[in-house]
Image: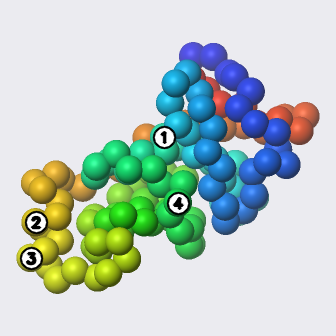
Amino acid sequence: MSQIEAAKSGEVSEGALHAIKVAGHSIALTRVGGKVQAFVNKCPHLGMPLTKGKIEGGAVTCPFHGSKFDICSGRNVDWVKNFLGMPLPGWAQSALAMGKQPAGLKTLAATEKDGAIFLEV
């Protein structure tokens, strides 16, 4: 694996998602507790971008179907809970999941040095 410079430190804020392109892939950067975190900017449900999602308590929620992921570990916290922000009953959640099982985010190791953020790729 190698390290590449992904962004300047000042471009990544706590509670905000910053999208970048790395080797043709969209990557989301943010800070949790001041530490830079990185993950593939794609919800495992249908591949929609997560950078339009909401961050709360160290987790990002997909704005399209309400799936929620721990930003630091990538672990799935909730799976397909709503449609465009409208809560769904359990039977509709199962239908919207389309048979896909809960899955986590692909995270990347991020480090910060000399005012720059580096990713392991």
Where disc 2 sits, the SS reads helix
- The disc, 4 or 1, on the residue closer to the chain's N-terminal end is 1
Where disc 1 sits, the SS reads strand
The reply to whether callout 3 and callout 4 are in contact (CB within 8 Å) is no
Q: Residue at x 56, y 39 (%)?
A: 27
- Alpha carbon distance from label 3 to label 4: 26 Å
42 up-or-down from 51: above or below: above
Q: Residue at x 35, y 71 (%)?
A: 84
Q: Position of residue 116 (x, y in %)?
A: 83, 35
The reply to whether callout 2 and callout 1 are in contact (CB within 8 Å) is no
- Alpha carbon distance from label 3 to label 2: 6 Å
- Alpha carbon distance from label 4 to label 1: 13 Å
Closest to the observer, 61 or 34? 61
Q: Residue at x 41, y 62 (%)?
A: 62
- Residue 77 in view, yes or no: no
- Residue 91 disc label: 3
- Residue 95 disc label: 2
**Dot in front, 2 or 1:** 2
Q: Residues within 10 Å of mark 3 (few under 14, many from 20)?
A: few
Quarter holding residue 8: top right
- The disc, 3 or 4, on the residue closer to the chain's N-terminal end is 4
Q: Position of residue 60 (x, y in %)?
A: 50, 63
- Residue 40 disc label: 1
The reply to whether callout 4 and callout 1 are in contact (CB within 8 Å) is no
The amino acid type of the residue labelled 1 equals Val
The reply to whether callout 3 and callout 2 are in contact (CB within 8 Å) is yes
The amino acid type of the residue labelled 2 equals Ala
Q: Position of residue 22 (x, y in %)?
A: 59, 27
- Alpha carbon distance from label 2 to label 4: 24 Å
- The disc, 2 or 1, on the residue closer to the chain's N-terminal end is 1
Among all residues in the image, which is located at the extreme right? Answer: 114
**Quarter occupied by the C terminus:** top right
